[in-house]
Image: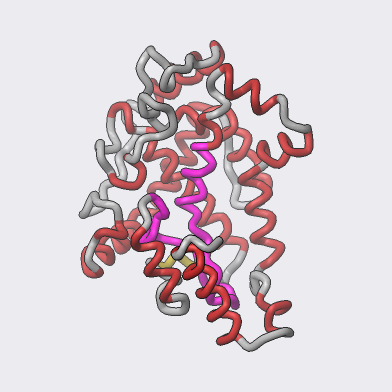
């Protein structure tokens, strides 16, 4: 997963070496995610993007089941589709997720999670686990929020300027499956993207200098970082089913609200943040 040189020019903490070795052993037979077109989805034409999405919908339950059994077999963790299960996933991720993404020589994860290049085998096999963690988190939210479902691109139809901006930006998971279906049409939850962000953040915990910087933070900040997945999941449950739309519509119409949200994307695109 990483060479003996460590992440970039930094060296893994001793206990991280042991975790890394165990992960390498457990990932030998982990099934690769195998969509028809292994290209960053934002670059695909609509018909090929749809084929990738249809593949995702066919295999998502099977992959989630494999991941949960993998956790049970190798780490003795049982995930249930509730806040306790997400808390257990968060705790496991704090220990191992930072070792799942391969690091570039300069530090930070490679682009493989978004581009499928290099393939998700060998040193990049951890991408499969990160992806399946995202599937699991999304499915757990759907279980607890019956109106929600996976969709291909829930944004572009209601926020066309936002969709155009996202399509131009690398690494934003545009046109990858997202959880949508709330009463707020401007709101979706890119669980697959969030999981990559979570793993990326945990990479900073695996080496001595970065771990020291984390532990120098105030405890309240460390707690927020530590419980990142759990807090995000609880926040989504708390806001369901309106996802904040009620309060907004007391002040403006739905069309005014959508235009406001879309105009913010336009301002960011112009560099006027």
* Rendering coords of residue 149 (x, y %): 48, 67
Q: Residue 132, relative to residue 103: is it above or below?
A: below
Screen quadrant of the N terminus:
top left
Q: In the image, which residues are magenta?
A: 171-200
Residue at x 60% of width, y 66% of height: 145
Q: Residue 266, relative to residue 172: is it above or below?
A: below
* Rendering coords of residue 220 (x, y %): 78, 38
Using the image as rendered, state which of residue 22 and residue 194 is in the foreground. Answer: 194
* Rendering coords of residue 254 (x, y %): 60, 85
Screen quadrant of the C terminus:
bottom right
Left or right: where does residue 60 sit relative to residue 42?
right
* Rendering coords of residue 111 (x, y %): 34, 40
Residue at x 36% of width, y 29% of height: 104
Using the image as rendered, state which of residue 61 and residue 107 is in the foreground. Answer: 107
Q: Residue 51 sits in which quadrant?
A: bottom left
**Taking the image as drawn, is residue 205 in sight?**
yes
Q: Residue 3 sits in which quadrant?
A: top left
Scheme of image coloration:
secondary structure
Q: How many marks?
A: 0
Q: Residue 49 sits in which quadrant?
A: bottom left
Left or right: where does residue 215 sit relative to residue 179?
right
Residue at x 47% of width, y 17% of height: 10
In magenta segment, residue 197: yes
Residue at x 54% of width, y 20% of height: 207
**Taking the image as drawn, is residue 85 in sight?**
no
In magenta segment, residue 160: no
Q: Residue 171, relative to residue 237: is it above or below?
A: above
Left or right: where does residue 138 sit relative to residue 107?
right
């Amino acid at each position: 997963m990483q060479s003996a040189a460590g992440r970039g020019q930094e060296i893994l903490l001793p206990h991280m070496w042991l975790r890394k070795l165990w992960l390498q052993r457990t990932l030998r037979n982990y099934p690769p995610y195998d969509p028809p077109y292994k290209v960053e989805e934002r670059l695909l034409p609509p018909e090929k993007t749809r084929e990738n999405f249809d593949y995702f919908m066919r295999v998502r339950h099977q992959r989630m089941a494999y991941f949960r059994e993998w956790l049970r077999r190798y780490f003795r963790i049982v995930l249930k589709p509730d806040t306790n299960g997400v808390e257990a996933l968060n705790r496991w991720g704090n220990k191992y997720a930072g070792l799942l993404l391969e690091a570039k020589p300069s530090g930070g994860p490679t682009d493989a999670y978004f581009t499928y290049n290099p393939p998700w085998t060998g040193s990049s096999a951890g991408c499969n686990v990160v992806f399946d963690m995202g599937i699991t988190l999304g499915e757990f939210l759907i279980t607890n929020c019956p109106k929600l479902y996976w969709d291909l691109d829930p944004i572009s139809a209601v926020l066309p300027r936002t969709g155009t901006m996202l399509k131009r930006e690398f690494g934003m998971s545009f046109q990858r499956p997202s959880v949508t279906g709330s009463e707020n049409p401007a709101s979706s939850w890119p669980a697959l993207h969030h999981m990559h962000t979570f793993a990326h953040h945990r990479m900073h915990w695996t080496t001595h200098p970065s771990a020291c910087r984390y532990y120098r933070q105030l405890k309240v900040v460390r707690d927020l970082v530590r419980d990142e997945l759990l807090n995000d999941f609880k926040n989504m449950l708390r806001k369901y089913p309106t996802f904040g739309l009620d309060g907004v519509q007391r002040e403006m119409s739905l069309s005014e609200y959508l235009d406001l949200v879309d105009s913010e994307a336009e301002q960011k695109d112009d560099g006027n943040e």
